[in-house]
Amino acid sequence: MTQAALVIDNLKKIYASGTEALKGVSLTVPAGDFFGLLGPNGAGKTTVLGIVTGLVNKTAGTVSVFGCDIDKEPEKAKAHIGLVGQEINFNPFEKPFDIVVNQAGYYGIPRSVAIPRAKKLLVDLGLGDKMTQKAMTLSGGMKRRLMIARALVHQPRFLILDEPTAGVDVELRRGMWEYLRALTKEGLTILLTTHYLEEAEQLCRHIAIINKGQIISNGSMKDILKKLKSETISIDLTQPVTSNALDALRAYGPKKVDDTTIEIEIGAGRGLHDAIMILDQHHLAVQSVRNKSGKLEEVFVKLINE
Amino acid sequence: MGASGNWISFYTMVRKDIVRMFRIWVQTFLPSVVTSVLYFLIFGTVLGSKIGDMQGVPYMTFVVPGLVMLAIVTTSYANTSFMFFASKFFARSIDEILVSPTPPWVIIAGFIGGGIVRGMLVGVLVLLVSLFFTGLHLAVHNVVIIFCFAILTALIFALAGLVNGVYAKSIDGINIIPTFVLTPLVYLGGVFYSVHVLPPWWQTITYADPLFYLVNGFRYGFLGITDISLLMSVGILLGMVVVLIAINWYLIRKGLGVKQ
Ligand SMILES: Nc1ncnc2c1ncn2[C@@H]1O[C@H](COP(=O)(O)OP(=O)(O)O)[C@@H](O)[C@H]1O
Ligand SMILES: [Mg+2]
């Protein structure tokens, strides 16, 4: 059996304020995996990552990273991890080059080794010409990439990213995905939390969904998607929809969005093809058809509302 | 991380702080020099002539070790309390160290390291300034003792500053303690006078003041005069060091003020 990168067992956290942020979270991230931890705001994602990386004290439960228990061998466990936190947490007056080289130092890596590594990482992440400017002059996306460089400088086996693409524009987001994908190909295990379900769908092999401090679903992306029993499809018509046509589509739970747009539910026994045939019978031509939202988003909304 | 890893992490923390303090030397080194010039002018030149001798030496000569000590105390304390507070309060860059495999005792060493270096450098600067006021005449009785007591002072107050930095919840939190605790310790610990001039009950209180032992030992290094046994002083001071390290170790390991 290959060793798991992360094993979390019955993790509980009650903050000093009395907030019960985690109510017994158990989770395993296989080595080499690209794992997504999803959940709405306040679900407890950052709390889980905080405990794993040593920034938050847990109330109960156990955590081990590549077999190292975070209580018994905290230093060994930490050496395996690189963290890209949710909030910007570098000194804005320092320069990216110094930030990355110093981070290597905290991991016991001498400057002679750290300097070339830091340069390469910063160049690879598109910060080559910003290395010696104050970090506060970087844009939001650049700051995030600086945090990725900083998290990778000690060559961890396990990279943890807490909403790394929040506030990063679409173009750059895709570039970041490519970069992360390439890293997993080299054997790095990645755990990320995200708000963008499209992101999880694109990147992750396994996902867990957390809500109100509890894991409500956990498995391979494929299995989770199977939980989707029906899909909402949005159809644009060339002409206004008639009430007769809507009546004929009754089995599909039709919703009129505007004159020429309807939404229907397709699923077992209710194929898209049949729906289009019905529209055709009512002399309504279809201009375009699209999934109303990413598939995962629907599962997500469903699971959370259950 | 083995011993070499810990050493590199410690070196990284201290190096970073030294680079910082030299970059902003106007804020880190100059103020103590200016303050000490004022003290020398007022206590040494203006008042000193009225006071005359203290323990058999001219007042100016008597007060030099005390003022050097004062500079070391305030500087090393301010450096660690501010550095720790700043790293948890502004931008939370303390996370950089907390997520790393740097163990708590190395974190403590790293933070106080910068404070000790800056405290000692400021001490040397104030000593150089004093040469100007004493007409390049500096009494030196025992250099080793001077150095030991200077280091002990920087160590104790850097450690105390770290405790302050851990507990501080706002910038006021690192300014209040120096005003209400550090200043009285300095003024009552014999920086400006020999405790023998105090009434007996007051002398007894002085024995709880670490500065009393530090100033006394330091002054001995320069002038060869002492109010109490040096060996006992060192014993008491080392005891204080051990207690302060233990407190810091507990606080940093638990992550007070930095881990939720
Ligand atoms: N430092 C804190 N003190 C008190 N409550 C907190 C703290 N951090 C987070 N919480 C609470 O814990 C819960 C989980 O928060 P968090 O882990 O940040 O969620 P997520 O990252 O999924 O948005 C929320 O109810 C949040 O308000
Ligand atoms: Mg979060």
Image (cartoon, coloured by chain):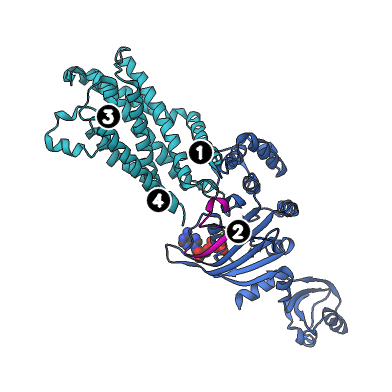
Chain colours: A blue, B cyan
- Could you tell me if the residues under marks 1 and 3 are in contact, i.e. CB atoms within 8 Å? no
List the residue tagged with mark 1: B10
Residue B103's spot in the image, x, y percent? Answer: 49, 47
Look at label 2 and name its amino acid. Answer: Gly
List the residue tagged with mark 3: B215
Front position in the image: A196 or B247: B247
List the residue tagged with mark 2: A67
Q: Which numbered disc flags the more N-terminal residue, 3 or 4?
A: 3
- Determine which of the numbered discs, if any, sits on residue B250 in the image: 4
Quadrant of residue A43 within the rendered picture: bottom right
Chain letter of the residue beneath label 4 in the structure image: B
Residue B123's spot in the image, x, y percent? Answer: 37, 26
- Residue A58 belongs to the span the image colors magenta: no
Q: Quadrant of the C terminus of chain A?
A: bottom right
Separation (CA) of disc 1 from disc 2: 27 Å
* A31 sits to left or right of B7: right
Front position in the image: A234 or B114: B114
Q: Can the viewer see residue A221 in this picture?
A: yes
Give the extent of the magenta segment.
A59-76
